[in-house]
Image: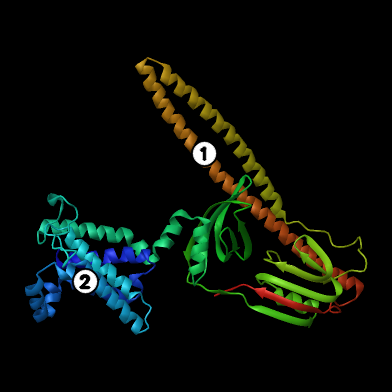
Amino acid sequence: MTFPNHLAAGITFTGIFAAIADVNIFSDPSLIGLTVFAAVLPDIDHTASPVGKIVYPFARWLHRRVGHRTLTHSLLALLTLSFLVGILETWFGSNNNYRTVFFFAYFSHIIGDMITIQGVQFFYPFSKAPCVIPGRRELRFRTGDRAHETVLFAGIALTFLFCQPLMQNGFWTTYNRSFGYPKHLWSEFKKSEDILEVDFAFRDGSEIYEGKAYCLEATEDKFTLLENGKFRLLDASKQVILHTIPTHTGKRFSFPQQTFVNITFDSLNRLILDKTIMNIEVKSDQHFLTHIGQLKQEGKNYTGKYINQAIIFGQVPSTVTKDSLLLTKNPHIKSLREKLTELSTEQNRNQIQLQSSKTNLQNIQNEASNTEDLYRREELIKHIEKVEKEIANLEKSLTSRAARITDTRRQIRELKERDQQSHTKSRLQAEVKKKGKIMSTTNFTGLVQFVVIK
């Protein structure tokens, strides 16, 4: 194999196999330099090679002593030199995986010469028998033959282009993205230094949910995701997780914790306003109300985790008056419900049509298999193709409409939550004005932990 092919094969071979060892040779210029050096180093026993010309006296002496493709192309040289590189790496306190890169780059040269007609004496000096791949001579490449070398270079170049994502992202990241199993997300999360964005899909009952979110916490079968500022918990024991495909974002997250002592309602509500709250613990010497969406809780303490809705702390009213503010509904909810009804009706109609088409297809297939009239059979086959296309279009339409139904339901839920939050705030303000009191008579102590993404 000639010098250009050794260079190309060295980078491609090393990039692929180093990626399996979680080493990206493109992440550091020194790793690329080492790859190029090690990929051509075995030819130091040949005076006509580029590396042999650089150290010509040594190359000439080595060639006269042992010949070409012997000692420098052997398993002994591969292991010995890799061991020495490892010692130097440890000596200088480096952790750049130089030994791994050197091993694969040097080995790529030996493998490249094995697929030539001459082969290499891989087990030199213990055996001088040539090692070749494959065994049949006519299937191996001829060194220096322009046609052979060109075909080989083209194959290496195509392999490099095809495997470039694998080299840059690493084997396990590429594997995780391809299969998307929960355990692979957990494995990727444990070793990741940045935030993983997860493309997820799961089935809960008869509904399928999918989206993208940041992964905050992970175990083998449970994941805490942050989707558009809201927490989503994936639990393989309660849901059918279809896929979880992670992508590195380069972003970092932190969980700053803030404690507070003897602060008022107003101060506490300002502290948590528009924040992503992961944990919160609140205590007081008096009873107070905690409003989360449509839920209301009374007591002297409150503890919450993964808060998805705005929290409002308020004073317990002495009486519940009948003239409290009425809940105002967003008019857009009505139009969304009408849209949902229309979509559901169309979905049911298409499902009936799909079932009818499948029954019709079965009948036509049975008739085609039983008829002996060739002309009639040809007509039936054309009809089968037409019905199959119709079924495929109906199934595609059903899938698309199911996604629109799910999205419409989500919009309705979010609008109802906003209406309830607005109503709660207005009611609290009305109660304060009516009683003529200021909601600062109760003091709070506790802590709150936020999620911050940088």
| The quadrant where residue 410 appears | bottom right
Are there few (<14), some (14-19), or many (20+) residues within 10 Å of tag 1? some
Q: Is mark 2 on a helix, strand or loop?
A: helix
Q: Is mark 1 on a helix, strand or loop?
A: helix
- x, y percent for residue 437: 89, 76
* 56 relative position to 165: left or right: left
CB within 8 Å, label 2 to label 1:
no
Are there few (<14), some (14-19), or many (20+) residues within 10 Å of tag 2? some
- x, y percent for residue 253: 56, 73
Taking 412 as reference, is 371 above or below it?
A: above
Q: In 3D space, how far apart are the residues under numbered discs 2 and 1 (Cα atoms)?
A: 61 Å
- x, y percent for residue 201: 55, 53
| The quadrant where residue 399 appears | top right
Say if residue 314 shows up in the picture. yes
Front of the two marks 2 and 1: 2
Residue extending furthest bottom?
92
Q: Which amino acid does label 1 sit on?
A: Glu
- Quadrant housing the C terminus: bottom right
Taking 178 as reference, is 228 above or below it?
A: below
Q: Which amino acid does label 2 sit on?
A: Ala
* 420 relative position to 72: left or right: right
> Any mark on residue 171, and which?
none
* 45 relative position to 372: left or right: left
User: Mark 1 sits on what residue?
Assistant: 395
> Any mark on residue 77, and which?
2
* 453 relative position to 438: left or right: left
- x, y percent for residue 121: 15, 63
Sequence-earlier tag: 2 or 1: 2
- Quadrant housing the N terminus: bottom left
